Image: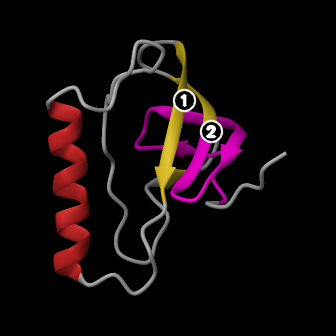
Amino acid sequence: MAEDAFGIVGSVIAGAYHVESVVAEGGFGTVYRAHHGGFRAPVALKCLRLPPGLLPEARQHFLESFRAEAAHGALPAPSALSLRSLPLAAHGSQGQRSSGA
């Protein structure tokens, strides 16, 4: 099984995503099984790993490209889910967390 690279299993991300387990890990990030509290539905939560030492301008460009692809439907395939939110972590942190389930 892939490791919890972001250390978020058991956490609640962005006030809605109850992270249950790691599904897979790849070169650009980790996919988690989570449960969306508001929709009461299982979801896949992908946490992207930006390269270390990325300059702020390059980080912004990466995020804008990702947003543009999501807005134009370039990301979802017939078997994939749509992007529902893009919580951003402060540079150097792993994301917004709260304890509990």
For residue 32, which numbered disc appears in the image?
A: 2
Mark 2 is surrounded, within 10 Å at the Cα level, by few (under 14), some (14 to 19) or many (20 or more) other residues, namely many
State yes or no: residue 15 in magenta.
yes
In this rendering, is residue 91 above or below 7?
below
In-front residue for pair 17/66: 66
Residue type pointed to by label 1: Ala
Residue at the spot of label 1: 44
The residue depicted at 21 percent of the width and 39 percent of the height is 69
Residue 21 in the figure: left or right of residue 74: right
Quarter the N terminus occupies: top right
For residue 18, which numbered disc appears in the image?
A: none
The residue depicted at 25 percent of the width and 31 percent of the height is 74
Dots 1, 2 in contact, CB < 8 A: yes
Secondary structure state at the residue bearing disc 1: strand
Magenta region: 7-31
Rendering coords of residue 96 (x, y %): 43, 55
In this rendering, is residue 23 above or below 5?
above
In-front residue for pair 69/41: 69
